Amino acid sequence: MKTRLAVRSTAFILLLAGFLGLVFLLLAMKLVSDQERRRQDEQLQGLLNTVDSTLQIAVFLGDRQLATEVVRGLLSNSTVTGVTIRGDSGVLAESRAPPGATDSILPPSLLQTIFGRMTASATLERPVSSPFDDQVVGSIRLIPNQDAIASQVERSTLLVMALLAVQMVFIGFGVVYVVVRYITKPIASISHRLHKLRAETGEQLAPPRGNEEDEIGQLVNDVNAIIDHLVKILGAERELRMQREVDERKFRAIFDNAESAIFLVDSLGQVQSWNPAFARHFAVPRELLAGQQAIDLKSLVAEGGDNLLEQFAQCRREGTTSQLEVNVRHQPGHWLQLSLTAVDDELVQGVANDISERMLAEQAALQRAMTDPLTGLGNRAGFETRLTRLLRTRGEHPDFALLMLDLDHFKAVNDTHGHQAGDLVLQVIGERLSAATRHSDYVARLGGDEFVVLLEGVSDAGPIRRLADNLLVSLIQPIPLDDRQEISVAVGASIGIAFATPGCAMAELVRLADNAMYEAKNNGRNQYRLVGD
């Protein structure tokens, strides 16, 4: 019942036909019964009309014999069970028919239940008038035979019921045949074939015979069209999947063999995935590669990695690509250029390329640009850069001093021994200055025979004076001009010293030290002057 459409539809149609048949049968029984009762009443009225003339004469004359004949004639009809004729002098004739068996098919109780009692015609009484005028001279009372009338009503009703029942049965089974033959059976056939159909192979349905042009045939055509569309989609999907697999293998090969480091990092800076080049470029420790703990990108970089999280947030927020340069923590000379691009609200994709050679070249170029090629010390550009940084970082609380040195009698060395000897003297002086100062101090040759020393972390004049005394002693020592040390020269230095003050500008500090140096030179040379002495 739950799985067969034909069984369900047949049962439903038969139940519906049975219900409607029962309703129509009951309605027909009621209508036929009422009609038959009216016909019996009309028949009794017709009997009375038939004997009306004889009855008028018998009552008018008071003829009992004639009245008795009328009663007998009326009782000869099976639908009359009793007759009483009255005149002015009383009852002229009265008689009742003996009770007889009816030919009813149904029990009397069932007849009463279905048709009810014929109370409307229980007695029929009519006044009798004179045959010569309209004066009432008597009356007649007729008692109908209820059982006979009910039997006739039953026969007429049952005949109609039988005809209706046969009609409903034929209609019901006819509808069942039509529905099953032309609707449910084709649909069941389509369902059965569709259940076994292999749509992925392009197999299609054939419409049931006789349904090629109707709605069921159109349904089959629509199913076939869906199958065609499905086959096309499956084919396209198969091709796309194969192409995707090929692309994935290509991208995987590129990903694994790329020289660039490719990685994904979350909003907390934790690296989620990476390629082998990532491990090489960032010198990732083995314990991190083994997966023992999460890889924090910030822990892998040194210089340039302070604002990594800010860069990640900016990429995700603005959807832009950020570029920055970082130095690998475990390989200080290894520099990488990071290109960061947001993937979604949480992940950022990074690509890192080795720029160590470029950075080394830039540093070398910067070093050359800020180094005196003769002495290897800083030059004027390097000195100004260093002094500018000190003024910017320690401008409010300066703790450094500037020593300005100018060699004494250096021009005589050039004039007497030549520029080659002069260059040798400058190189030796540079070496002696570097040897006398700390690694944190900065020594530079500004040009010619002019040198400067930046002393950091000093704010007291005592250490400065001792250094100046040592420099004067060291620089005045003879400098041999040949390997056999047969020729040597001695040059001294005039030194000017100035302490940096809060808010002091570079030009002002240089001017003060330079003025102090010229004061020392004018006062006899080979001595120093401290601004403020």
Image (cartoon, rainbow, N blue to C red):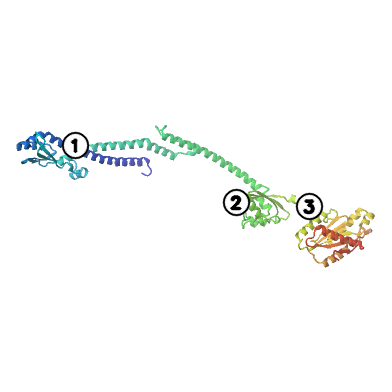
List the residue tagged with mark 3. 366
Residue 38 percent coordinates (x, y): 19, 38
| The one of 475 and 51 positioned closer to us in this rendering | 51
Q: Earlier in the sequence, mark 2 or mark 1?
A: 1
Residue 156 percent coordinates (x, y): 20, 37
Q: Is residue 317 above or below residue 241?
A: below
Q: Which mark is residue 206?
A: none
Residue 382 percent coordinates (x, y): 80, 55
Type of residue at label 1? Arg
The quarter of the displayed image where residue 22 is located: top left
- Looking at the image, residue 231 sits to the left or right of residue 446; the answer is left
Residue 118 shows in the view: no
Of circles 3 and 2, which is in front?
2
| The one of 349 and 53 positioned closer to us in this rendering | 53
Type of residue at label 2? Asp
| The one of 239 and 452 positioned closer to us in this rendering | 452
Of circles 2 and 1, which is in front?
1
List the residue tagged with mark 2. 345
For disc 1, the neighbor class at 10 Å (few under 14, some 14 to 19, many from 20) is some
